[in-house]
């Protein structure tokens, strides 16, 4: 909104990708653990035909300011089109450039799974029709509990599955500081998810 770029780290493949994965962090700028967790996934070993996009800071202005909302004062995880509500979702669904940009990335990449990283509620959830094996793999790898059937009106993770039809996961990291142990735990969770794709 203030002109800061939303950066996506892209792990390309030669030819056609067999599996495509998108991971988004920094959705709420006052959640400092998710950008380092997402950045740390960049060198997780995986087969060469898996294509990955990592967005450590969906809300760069909020991260800079330390605010939950973006520079317009809109909570980006209420601004997506699924279940959007006027009382907390901003002026309209997808009114914000950050939600539009990330939705475009998901639509264009057609991911086998999109992963949305928040804090600090301490659970892993597969959204909607997303296989339970996804949440179970990440939860086991990271040492966090599973929470079934989470929904969030206006939420990116909910829009991804319920509107987009793509598998979607919500990661709620446990705590407020991105300790090396926490980052390593979520690397393990991500690796366990990737292992499901063979
Ligand atoms: Zn959040």
Image: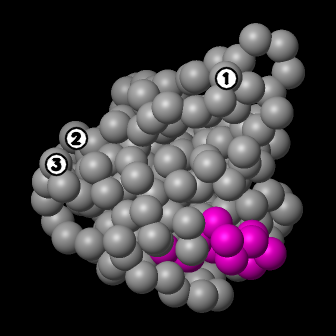
- Name the residue beneath numbered marker 2: 64
The residues tagged by marks 2 and 1 sit, at their Cα atoms, a distance apart of 34 Å
- Name the residue beneath numbered marker 1: 48
Q: Is residue 105 visible?
A: yes
The residues tagged by marks 2 and 3 sit, at their Cα atoms, a distance apart of 22 Å
Q: What element carries label 3?
A: helix
- Asked if the magenta segment contains residue 130, the reply would be yes
The residues tagged by marks 1 and 3 sit, at their Cα atoms, a distance apart of 27 Å
Q: The C terminus appears in which quarter of the rendering?
A: top right
Q: Earlier in the sequence, mark 1 or mark 3?
A: 1
Q: What element carries label 1?
A: loop
Q: Residue at x 45, y 43 (%)?
A: 58
Q: Is residue 7 left or right of residue 113?
A: left
- Identify whether 16 is placed above or below 176: above
Q: Which residue is drawn at 68% across and 77% down?
A: 132
Which region is colored magenta? 124-135
Q: What element carries label 2?
A: helix
- Choose mark 2 or mark 3, whichever is in front: 3
Crowding at dot 2, Cα within 10 Å, few <14 / some 14-19 / many 20+, comes out as some
Image quarter for residue 33? bottom left
- Identify whether 103 is placed above or below 17: below
Closer to us: 13 or 191: 191
Crowding at dot 3, Cα within 10 Å, few <14 / some 14-19 / many 20+, comes out as few
């Amino acid at each position: 909104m203030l002109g800061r770029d939303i950066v996506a780290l892209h792990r390309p493949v030669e030819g056609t990708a067999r599996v495509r994965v998108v991971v988004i962090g920094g959705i709420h700028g006052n959640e400092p653990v998710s950008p380092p967790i997402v950045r740390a996934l960049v060198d997780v070993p995986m087969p060469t035909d898996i294509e990955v996009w990592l967005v450590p800071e969906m809300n760069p202005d909020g991260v800079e300011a330390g605010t939950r909302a973006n520079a317009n004062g809109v909570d980006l995880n209420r601004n997506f089109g699924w279940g959007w509500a006027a009382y907390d979702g901003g002026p309209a669904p997808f009114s914000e450039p950050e939600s539009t940009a990330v939705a475009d990335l998901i639509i264009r990449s057609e991911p086998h799974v999109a992963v949305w990283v928040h804090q600090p509620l301490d659970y892993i959830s597969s959204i909607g029709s997303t296989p339970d094996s996804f949440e179970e793999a990440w939860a086991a790898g990271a040492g966090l509990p599973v929470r079934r059937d989470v929904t969030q009106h206006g939420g990116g993770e909910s829009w991804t599955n319920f509107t987009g039809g793509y598998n979607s996961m919500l990661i709620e990291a446990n705590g407020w500081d991105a300790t090396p142990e926490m980052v390593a735990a979520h690397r393990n969770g991500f690796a366990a998810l990737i292992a499901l794709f063979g």
